[in-house]
Image: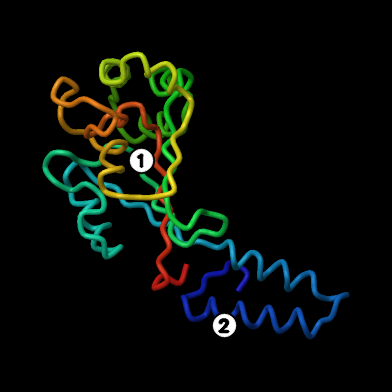
Amino acid sequence: DADLGLAGGDLRAAERTYQLLAQVAGRAGRAPFTALRDRLDRWAARVAVIGQVKAGKSSFLNAFLGEQGFLPSDVNPWTSVVTNIRINCAGDPETGARFEFFDEDAWSEIMDGGSEVRALTERLLPGFDSDVLRRQTEEMKERAQKRLGNYYHALLGTSHDYDFLTPELLQRYVCAGQAPEETSGRSALGRYAAITRVANLYLRRPEFAV
């Protein structure tokens, strides 16, 4: 299938077929089948889960993963950061996470336009008020500065990498929740959320075909 539009069992069957054809073809004719098998190994299904705040996105994903309480789904806190759950992706760690932080250019891109998301927003929302977006972004920056103090500027444009993954770790980076004055310390709820641009979570689930 040129588009690799295959179900789980088909994927395994195709993988075996490409491997067999590569063996039969010999060294001279092996390259096309090896390339197809490599492409198959890299193929991934991509699913976007979107919705309003507290619509049940995290609860759905927790059920989908069979991990109750994995993503925060209580009234307070809630998931406030774009979160990529990468399952069985070739080249990824067995488990862990990478949390990438905003830099000044990224803040400016949100406030001043130029990003694809900003352009899409203006196209889909007639009457979109860019001043509101600017004000909200400035408030998010101020919240991050207040919570992180002297660490704020050192964190800009960097990332934090972990070789483990727990709900408590996620709450530090992807949760909107209590106000800064109510929490302190590096393990505090939502400590890095306001400055986290994207969270990449790495999982291995043998029950998932891709």
**Which residue is found at the position 28% from the left and 36% from the top?**
172
Q: Residue 54, located in which quarter of the rendered image?
A: top left
Q: Residue 13, which numbered label?
A: 2
**Which residue is found at the position 62% from the left and 82% from the top?**
16
* Nearer-the-camera pick, 149 or 54: 149
Q: Residue 56, which numbered label?
A: none
Whole-percent x, y for residue 95 in the image: 43, 55
Label 2: how many Cα within 10 Å (few below 14, some 14–19, many 20+): few
Q: Is residue 192 above or below residue 199?
A: above
State the colouring used for the structure image: rainbow
**Which residue is found at the position 42% from the left and 26% from the top?**
102
Camera sees residue 136: no
As helix, strand or loop, the secondary structure at mark 1 comes to loop
As helix, strand or loop, the secondary structure at mark 2 comes to helix
**Which residue is found at the position 19% from the left and 51% from the top?**
56
Label 1: how many Cα within 10 Å (few below 14, some 14–19, many 20+): few
Q: Residue 189, located in which quarter of the rendered image?
A: top left
* Nearer-the-camera pick, 162 or 114: 162
Amino acid on which the number 2 mark rests in the picture: Ala
Q: Residue 82, which numbered label?
A: 1
Whole-percent x, y for residue 26 in the image: 84, 80
Whole-percent x, y for residue 157 in the image: 48, 25
* Nearer-the-camera pick, 200 or 130: 200
Q: Earlier in the sequence, mark 2 or mark 1?
A: 2
Amino acid on which the number 1 mark rests in the picture: Val
